[in-house]
Image (cartoon, grey):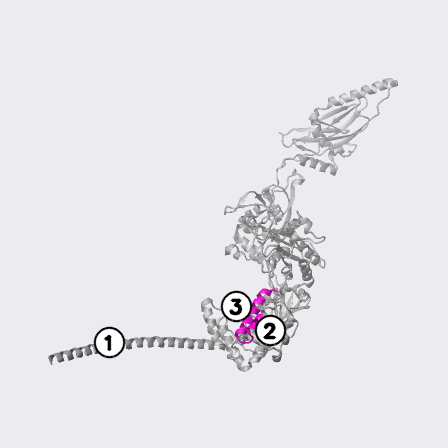
C-alpha cells in the first residue's frame, strides 16, 4: 500500500507541478496578446487620425479650389501680339488649335493615350488610389514630385486652371486638382473628358491639341493616323519640346516605342504589332514646314521675351487669357537682324556652328526694338542667347565697373593719370596687357581707348568695390552672384558675366545723359474687358550727366582707333563703343589644342544718339575641336553691329551728343601730373584738350618749358657803295634769367652767321636785293625772326677789258676771302641753317620788320623750338 501511495503521491506531485507550471504560462501569453492589441489599435488610431486630418486638410484645400467652367476646359482664347506700329504679327495660343469632336478621335489614339497616361481611366472616378499609392512610394524614395499620380482627368484640370510648372506642384494644388477631378467626372462622361484632354494638350512648336498636331506633323486628320503616328502623338504631352519628332528624332522614337510597349501591356495591341511599328522610322510621314517655321523664327526670340515678361509682370497666361499685347518690336529691324545672322548676304561666317546673341535698345525709352537669340535656330522658343546666356564680356566691362564709377564718385577727368606698369593680383597671378608691354604714365582716356588691363585694375581699387557695385546696380547689372556669389573681385575690372540685353541697356544710359531704363519688350497689355495694364518701367538717373558725356567722349575716340576705324564708323552717324574679348587659360589651350591667338568670346557694344546695340559671338560649346574664335572671327561682332546700326540709322536723325554745362573742356600740358595749364613756352605738341567735371579743372600754369623767346628788336642794315659793304646792327636781347647767354643767328642773302656781337659787316656783297633775318638763340631755343633788306648797287666797270677781267677775278677772290673771314664759327652752320630754312619776305624797314613777323614765321619758330625742347 505504501508503495502504491508513494506512486500515487509522485503522480499527484507531477500533476500538481504541471498544473503550477501551466498557470504562469497562461498569464504570460495573455499579457503578450494584450500588448499586440494595443500596438495594432495604436496604429489604427494613428491611421485614423491621419485620415481624419488628411480629410480635414483636403476639405480645407478643396474649399478654396477655383471654379472650373466648360470654357476653361474646352480651350483658350488666343492673345494678339502687336508690333510697335500696332500691327498684329503673331497670335499666341488659339491660333494653332483645331478642336476634334468625339467621333473624330480614332480608337488607336485613345488606346495609345490611355496606355501611357492612365490605364485605369475607364474605371476610376477621377482619381486613382493605386496610382497615387505608387507615386507616394516613389516620392518618399526619390523626393516629392519625382513621380506623378495624376489621372487624365487631373491633368485636364491642371491644363485648364493651374500652372504646369514643377515648382507649383504643392500639396494644396494636388488636393484641389483631385477635388475638381471628382467634380468633373460627375459632370461629364469619360469620352467627353478624354476628348477635352486631346484638344487641350500642348504639342510643341506652338501647337495645341492633337488634331492640330496631326495636321502639323503629318498633314492628315486624326482619323487617318497609323499606329506608329498615334503612338508618337500620344507620347508628346509629357515633354513636348523634348519629344518633338522633327527636332529630337532619337528621343521621340524612344518615347514612341515606350508607348507601344505600354499598349501591349494594356492589351490594346499585340507584341507583334508593336515590334512592326517600332521598325517604322520616326521621320516617316513628317511634313517639311521649314518655310512656315522660318517666317515665325524671324521674331521667335522676341516672342519668348514677350511671353516671359507678361507672365512675370501680370501673372496672366498669355496663351489662354485672350490679351492684346502691345510690344516695342521694330519689325523691319528684326527682319534685317535675322537676315544678318542667318544668311551670307551681309557677313561671311566661318561655319554653321558659330553663334551670336544680339540686343538692340532705343536709348531714350529703353524699349527693346530687336533681339537676335542665335543663328540657325530650328526649334521655336528655343535658347535665347541675348537674354539667357551669361558669358564674360571682357573689356566691354571697363566703362561700367571702372571708368564710369571713377568719374562719377572720384570726379576723375579724362586726363587723370595712371601708371601702366607690371601688376600682380592679390592672388599672386600676374596681369598682362593685350600686347604684353607697358606704356608708363598715361591718361585714363588713353588707357580706355587702348584697352589697357593694368590701369583698369588699378583704378578699380581706387574706386572700391562698394561704389563699383553701386554704379553697376544703377544700370541694371547685379554682380552679387559673380565669383561664386562673392560679388566683385579684382578681375571684374576687365570682365564680368552680363547678357547682351543687359549690356545694351547699360550702354544706352551713357547715350541718354545717364538716364537708365530697364529694357522691356511690352509697353501695354489690354484685357478682354478693355482694362489696360501699363508695363512701361520707370527710368532713373543712374549717373551724372557729366559722367555719361565724358565716357561717351572717350568711347567716340575708341570707335575711330585701330582696327575699329575700318569696321565700325558709319558716315553721318556719330557713334561710341567698346570691344571685349575673353581668353582661354594656358592650361585650356594646351588641353584642347587651341592656338595662341584663339579666344572663346568676342563682344562689341556700341551706340548712337538713337540706338544701343550689343553683340556677342562665340560657340555654345567652347572647348570642342575648332570651337574657338580666330582673329578674323573676332571681328564678327563689329561687323554685325555695323550692318544693323547702318540699317536702323537710315530712317532717323543722327545727332552728336551735346556737352552739358557740368563739363568743361580744358587745354592741359600733356605729361603734367596733376594736370596743369600750358605755360607760355609749352610746345603745341605737348598740349592736349581733356574734359573735367566743372569745378575740378586745373588752375596752375606749368613752368616746365621755361622762358618764351621774343623777336629781336632794332634790326637795321645799310649799304656803303664806296666801301662796297653792308653794315648791320641790332639791339641787345634782354634775358629774364641773367645766367643765360644769348647768341644771334644772322642770315644775309641766304648765307647764315652766328655771333654774340650786336653788329655785323658783310664786305663785297653781290649786287641786287639782299634779304636779312635775325633770330636769337638761348640754349636750345630759337626765337622768331626779325627781317629787313637792302639793295646793293651795280659794280663800276673798268675801261680796260683785260684789267676788267683781272679786277673781277681779284674782286671775287677778295669777296670770297672776306666772306670766309667774316664767319665767326663755321661749326654753327647747322644750327644757323635750321633757323633760316623758312625765312619769309621782309619789309624794307628794319623797324617794321623787328616789330612784326608773319604767321608762318611764328609757326616755323614754334616748330623749331618744339623740336629741340626736352621731353
Quarter-of-image position of residue 800? top right
User: Mark 1–mark 3 contact, CB under 8 Å?
Assistant: no
Assign the C terminus to one quadrant of the image. top right
| Residue corresponding to mark 1 | 24
Disc 2, SS = helix
Between residues 399 and 757, which one lies in front from this camera angle?
A: 399
Foreground tag (1 vs 3)? 1
Foreground tag (1 vs 2)? 2
Residue 697 badge:
none
Residue at image position (58%, 64%) is 250
Foreground tag (3 vs 2)? 2
Disc 3, SS = helix
Tell me if residue 113 can be seen.
Answer: yes
Q: Earlier in the sequence, mark 1 or mark 3?
A: 1
Between residues 411 and 219, which one lies in front from this camera angle?
A: 219
| Residue corresponding to mark 2 | 227
> Badge 1, how many Cα within 10 Å: few under 14, some, many 20+?
few
Assign the N terminus to one quadrant of the image. bottom left
Q: CA distance from mark 1 to mark 3?
A: 62 Å
Between residues 744 and 803, which one lies in front from this camera angle?
A: 803
Q: Earlier in the sequence, mark 1 or mark 2?
A: 1
Image vertical order of residue 18 relative to residue 699, above or below: below
Which range of residues does the magenta coloring cover?
247-275
Q: Earlier in the sequence, mark 3 or mark 2?
A: 3
Amino acid at each position: 500500500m505504501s508503495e502504491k501511495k508513494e506512486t500515487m503521491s509522485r503522480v499527484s506531485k507531477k500533476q500538481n507541478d504541471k498544473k503550477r507550471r501551466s498557470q504562469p504560462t497562461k498569464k504570460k501569453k495573455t499579457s503578450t496578446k494584450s500588448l499586440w492589441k494595443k500596438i495594432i489599435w495604436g496604429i489604427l488610431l494613428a491611421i485614423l487620425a491621419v485620415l481624419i486630418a488628411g480629410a480635414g486638410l483636403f476639405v480645407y484645400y478643396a474649399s478654396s479650389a477655383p471654379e472650373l467652367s466648360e470654357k476653361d476646359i474646352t480651350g483658350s482664347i488666343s492673345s494678339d501680339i502687336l508690333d510697335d506700329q500696332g500691327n498684329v504679327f503673331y497670335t499666341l495660343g488659339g491660333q494653332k488649335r483645331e478642336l476634334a469632336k468625339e467621333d473624330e478621335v480614332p480608337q488607336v489614339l485613345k488606346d495609345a493615350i490611355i496606355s501611357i497616361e492612365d490605364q485605369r481611366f475607364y474605371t476610376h472616378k477621377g482619381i486613382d488610389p493605386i496610382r497615387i499609392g505608387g507615386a507616394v512610394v516613389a516620392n518618399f524614395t526619390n523626393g516629392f514630385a519625382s513621380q506623378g499620380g495624376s489621372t487624365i482627368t487631373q491633368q485636364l484640370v491642371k491644363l485648364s486652371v493651374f500652372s504646369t510648372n514643377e515648382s507649383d506642384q504643392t500639396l494644396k494644388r494636388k488636393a484641389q486638382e483631385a477635388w475638381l477631378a471628382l467634380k468633373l467626372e460627375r459632370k461629364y462622361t469619360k469620352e467627353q473628358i478624354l476628348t477635352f484632354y486631346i484638344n487641350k494638350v500642348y504639342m510643341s512648336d506652338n501647337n495645341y491639341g492633337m488634331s492640330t498636331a496631326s495636321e502639323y506633323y503629318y498633314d492628315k486628320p486624326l482619323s487617318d493616323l497609323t499606329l506608329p503616328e498615334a503612338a508618337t502623338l500620344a507620347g508628346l504631352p509629357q515633354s513636348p519640346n523634348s519629344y518633338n519628332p522633327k527636332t529630337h528624332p532619337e528621343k521621340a522614337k524612344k518615347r514612341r516605342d515606350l508607348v507601344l510597349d505600354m499598349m501591349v501591356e494594356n492589351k490594346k495591341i499585340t507584341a507583334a504589332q508593336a515590334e512592326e511599328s517600332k521598325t517604322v522610322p520616326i521621320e516617316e510621314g513628317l511634313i517639311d514646314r521649314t518655310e512656315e517655321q522660318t517666317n515665325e523664327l524671324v521674331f521667335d526670340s522676341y516672342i519668348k521675351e514677350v511671353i516671359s515678361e507678361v507672365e512675370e509682370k501680370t501673372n496672366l497666361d498669355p496663351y489662354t487669357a485672350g490679351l492684346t499685347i502691345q510690344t516695342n518690336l521694330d519689325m523691319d529691324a528684326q527682319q534685317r537682324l535675322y537676315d544678318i545672322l542667318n544668311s551670307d548676304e551681309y557677313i561671311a561666317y566661318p561655319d554653321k556652328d558659330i553663334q551670336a546673341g544680339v540686343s538692340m535698345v532705343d536709348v531714350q525709352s529703353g524699349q527693346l526694338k530687336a533681339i537676335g537669340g542665335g543663328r540657325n535656330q530650328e526649334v521655336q522658343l528655343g535658347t535665347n542667347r541675348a537674354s539667357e546666356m551669361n558669358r564674360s564680356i571682357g573689356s566691354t566691362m571697363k566703362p561700367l565697373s571702372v571708368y564710369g564709377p571713377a568719374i562719377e564718385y572720384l570726379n576723375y577727368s579724362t586726363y587723370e593719370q595712371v601708371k601702366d606698369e607690371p601688376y600682380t593680383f592679390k592672388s599672386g597671378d600676374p596681369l598682362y596687357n593685350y600686347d604684353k608691354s607697358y606704356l608708363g604714365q598715361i591718361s585714363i582716356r588713353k588707357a580706355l581707348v587702348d584697352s589697357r588691363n593694368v590701369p583698369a585694375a588699378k583704378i578699380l581699387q581706387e574706386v572700391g568695390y562698394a561704389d563699383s557695385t553701386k554704379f553697376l546696380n544703377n544700370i541694371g547689372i547685379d554682380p552679387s552672384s559673380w565669383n561664386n556669389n562673392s560679388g566683385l573681385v579684382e578681375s571684374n575690372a576687365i570682365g564680368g558675366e552680363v547678357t547682351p540685353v543687359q549690356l545694351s541697356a547699360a550702354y544706352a544710359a551713357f547715350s541718354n545723359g545717364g538716364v537708365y531704363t530697364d529694357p522691356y519688350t511690352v509697353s501695354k497689355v489690354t484685357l478682354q474687358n478693355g482694362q489696360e495694364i501699363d508695363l512701361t518701367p520707370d527710368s532713373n538717373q543712374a549717373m551724372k550727366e557729366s559722367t555719361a558725356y565724358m565716357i561717351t567722349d572717350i568711347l567716340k575716340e575708341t570707335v575711330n582707333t585701330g582696327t575699329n576705324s575700318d569696321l565700325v564708323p558709319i558716315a553721318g552717324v556719330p557713334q561710341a563703343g567698346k570691344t571685349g574679348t575673353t581668353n582661354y587659360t594656358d592650361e585650356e589651350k594646351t588641353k584642347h589644342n587651341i592656338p595662341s591667338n584663339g579666344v572663346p568670346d568676342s563682344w562689341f557694344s556700341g551706340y548712337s544718339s538713337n540706338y544701343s546695340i550689343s553683340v556677342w559671338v562665340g560657340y555654345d560649346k567652347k572647348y570642342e575641336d575648332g570651337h574657338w574664335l580666330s582673329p578674323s572671327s573676332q571681328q564678327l561682332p563689329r561687323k554685325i553691329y555695323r550692318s544693323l546700326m547702318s540699317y536702323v540709322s537710315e530712317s532717323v536723325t543722327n545727332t552728336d551728343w551735346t556737352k552739358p554745362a557740368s563739363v568743361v573742356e580744358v587745354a592741359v600740358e600733356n605729361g603734367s601730373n596733376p594736370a596743369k595749364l600750358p605755360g607760355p613756352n609749352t610746345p603745341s605738341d605737348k598740349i592736349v584738350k581733356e574734359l573735367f567735371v566743372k569745378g575740378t579743372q586745373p588752375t596752375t600754369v606749368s613752368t616746365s618749358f621755361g622762358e618764351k623767346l621774343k623777336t629781336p628788336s632794332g634790326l637795321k642794315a645799310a649799304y656803303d657803295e664806296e666801301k662796297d659793304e653792308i653794315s648791320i646792327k641790332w639791339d641787345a636781347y634782354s634775358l629774364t634769367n641773367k645766367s643765360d647767354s644769348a647768341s644771334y643767328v644772322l642770315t644775309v642773302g641766304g648765307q647764315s652767321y652766328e655771333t654774340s656781337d650786336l653788329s655785323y659787316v658783310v664786305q663785297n656783297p653781290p649786287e641786287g636785293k639782299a634779304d636779312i633775318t635775325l633770330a636769337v638763340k638761348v640754349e636750345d631755343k630759337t626765337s622768331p625772326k626779325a627781317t629787313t633788306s637792302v639793295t646793293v648797287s651795280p659794280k663800276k666797270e673798268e675801261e680796260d677789258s683785260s684789267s676788267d677781267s683781272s679786277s673781277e677775278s681779284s674782286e671775287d677772290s677778295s669777296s670770297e676771302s672776306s666772306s670766309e673771314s667774316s664767319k665767326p664759327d663755321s661749326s654753327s652752320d647747322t644750327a644757323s641753317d635750321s633757323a633760316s630754312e623758312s625765312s619769309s619776305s621782309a619789309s624794307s624797314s628794319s623797324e617794321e620788320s623787328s616789330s612784326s613777323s608773319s604767321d608762318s614765321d611764328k609757326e616755323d619758330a614754334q616748330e623749331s623750338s618744339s623740336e629741340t625742347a626736352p621731353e
